[in-house]
Image (spheres, helix red, strand yellow):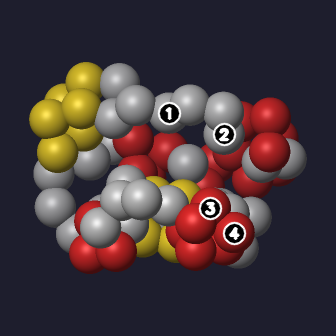
Amino acid sequence: CVEGSHDAVEQTLLPAEIITEHDFSLGPWWPPRTVDAVWCVELLEHVGRNFHKNLVPAFRKAAFM
C-alpha cells in the first residue's frame, strides 16, 4: 500500500509494515518488487498533472492496472 497522506498513514488500521508513505510530487516511487495488480483510488485529483509522470514507474511494476 502506498499512501501520500501522512495523516492517513498515522490513522490507518492497516499494519504499518505494509504501508509506504510517498509524496508523488517529490518524484517517482520505485516498488521493490513486481506485483500482480495495482488499484489506484482517489489519487489523481490530489496530484498535479505535472507530477502524473511520477506515478508511471509504480504502475509498471504490476501485471494489471
Residue pointed to by mark 1:
40
The kind of residue tagged 3 is Ala
Out of 24 and 3, give the one closest to the viewer.
Answer: 3
| Gap in angstroms between the C-alphas marked 4 and 1 | 18 Å
Q: Position of residue 44 (x, y in %)?
A: 71, 36
Please say if the residues under marks 1 and 3 sit with CB atoms less than 8 Å apart: no
Q: Is residue 16 left or right of residue 23?
A: left
Image-quadrant location for residue 32: bottom left
Out of 8 and 28, give the one closest to the viewer.
Answer: 8
Q: Return the residue found at the far top.
A: 64
| Gap in angstroms between the C-alphas marked 1 and 3 | 15 Å
The kind of residue tagged 2 is Leu
Of marks 2 and 4, the one in the foreground: 4
Please say if the residues under marks 4 and 3 sit with CB atoms less than 8 Å apart: yes
Q: Residues within 10 Å of mark 2 (few under 14, many from 20)?
A: few
- The circle on residue 43 is 2
Q: Residues within 10 Å of mark 1 (few under 14, many from 20)?
A: few
